[in-house]
Image (cartoon, grey):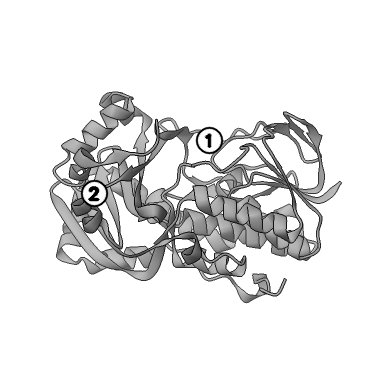
Amino acid sequence: MADALILGGGLAGAAAAVLLSRAGKTVHLIERETGPHHKICGEFLSIEARHHLVELGIDPARLGAVPIDRVRVIAGDAQIEAKLPFTALGLSRHVLDEALLDRAQGAGARVERGVRVLGMDAMAVRTSHGERSGTSILLATGKLPVREERKDSGHKDADPYVGFKMHYRLSGPARAQLEATVQLTLFDGGYAGLQMVEGGFANLCLIVRRSRLTRIGRSWSDLQAMLSSLPRGGEWLAEAEPLFARPVTIGNLSYGEVLRRRPDDGIFRLGDQAGMTASLTGDGMALALRSAFLAVACLRSGEDAQTYRQRHRAEIGRQLTRAMALQRALEQPLLRSLGVGLLRAWPGLLTYLASATRVTERPAEHALERAL
C-alpha cells in the first residue's frame, strides 16, 4: 500500500505527487487518460501559478508559454483594455499536465495510466483495473465527478454551466490583435476567453448556462455563429482554422466552494474537487496548484483531512467568494451594463479587479522548501 493514492493526473494531482515523492513518501497516481490530452481550461497561468510551477521545477517558458500582460473586456459594442498587475502566461494543459506527470515520475511516483475510477470511500477505490488503496487518498479528478459512498449530495445548480474549448490557428491580423492579451467577451448567459498559447495557437474557452445554450441551439456551430454575430469579439472567427475535429466539452459545471458540503471522510480533495472558482478570473490553475501544496504540507505534518479543509478554506475562501460575486454580478444585465460603464470611465478598474480576485500569498508556515 502506497503512502498516498492520488486520483487524477492533472495540475493538482501531479503537483501533489511531485511534492510527496520529494518528501520520501511512496506515491501511486491513477490517471484515466492514456496519454496527453486537452481539458476544458482557460490555460491562463497567473503569477501565483507561475511561482508554484517554479517550486515544482517546471519552467513554463521552456515549454513555449506565451507572455500575457494585458486584459481586454468586450461587452456589446464596448471594448475596454488595461494592463494586468503581473505578467501571466498562456500554456496549454496538453503540454503542462504532461510536464508535471513526467516530473512526478522522475521524483519516484508510480503513475498508472488508462485507469478509470468507478467509485470510492475513505478506505479504498474501485477502478476499471481492480481495487486500489493508500494510507491517504487524494481526490484530484478535476471537474469530473466520482461516485462516493455516503456522500452528501448537497446543493445542485438548477441551471449549471456547460464548457467548451477549441484551439485555432488565427489569421495574421487577428493574431497581432491578440498579442500579449487575454480577451474576455461577455454575453447573456455566459462568457468566452481567448488568448494565445504555445505553438502560435489561440485557445478559446467558452462557458454558457445550459438554459442559454438551449436557446442558442446546442450545437458548436450555433455557438460559433452566436459569437460571430456579436458587435465585437467574434470577428476573428471568420478566418480562423479550428484545430480539433470537435470541441472539448463538459456539462453540469457548478462554480463556487464545495468543501462545506463534503462529509468528514478523511479524503483530501484537491483542485476543482475542493472548490471551482469562476473561470473568468483566470486563477483556476493557481488554486489547483495551491491545494496540492496545502494538502502535502498537512500530510507531512501528520495532520488530517479536516485540518486541510480548514486551511484550504482560510487561504482560498476569500478568492472564491470574490470571484463568484463578480461572476453573478456580470450575469445580471443591469449590473453588467453598470459595470461596463464604470470600466469605460475608469479602465484601471480592470487592473484592480485582476488583483482583487487573486489567491493570497502562501503563508510561510505552509511553504515547502525547493530543495525537497
The one nearer the camera, 156 or 220, is: 220
Label at residue 155: 1
- Tell me whether circle 1 and circle 2 mark residues in contact (CB < 8 Å): no
Q: Is there any visible trace of residue 31 in the rendered image?
A: yes
| Residue 50, horizontal then vertical, whole percent | 50, 66
| Residue 105, horizontal then vertical, whole percent | 71, 54
Q: Secondary structure at mark 2?
A: helix
Residue appearing at x 46%, y 42% in the figure: 40
* Crowd around label 1: few <14 · some 14–19 · many ≥20 (10 Å): few
| Residue 189, horizontal then vertical, whole percent | 30, 37
Q: Is residue 356 above or below residue 371?
A: above
Q: Secondary structure at mark 1?
A: loop
Q: CA distance from mark 1 to mark 2?
A: 26 Å
Tell me if 196 is positioned left or right of 186 in this view.
right
The one nearer the camera, 353 or 108, is: 108
Residue appearing at x 64%, y 44% in the figure: 8
Dividing the picture into quarters, in which one does residue 73 lie? Answer: bottom left
The one nearer the camera, 365 or 92, is: 92
| Residue 342, horizontal then vertical, whole percent | 19, 60
Q: Amino acid at mark 2?
A: Arg
Label at residue 340: none
Q: Amino acid at mark 1?
A: His
Residue appearing at x 86%, y 46% in the figure: 1
* Crowd around label 2: few <14 · some 14–19 · many ≥20 (10 Å): many
Q: Is residue 283 above or below residue 59?
A: above
Quadrant position of the C terminus in the picture: bottom right
Q: Is there any visible trace of residue 276 in the rendered image?
A: no
Q: Which residue is mark 2?
A: 336
Q: Earlier in the sequence, mark 1 or mark 2?
A: 1
Outermost residue on the right side: it is: 1
Q: Is residue 120 above or below residue 343?
A: above
Tell me if 239 is positioned left or right of 96 in this view.
left
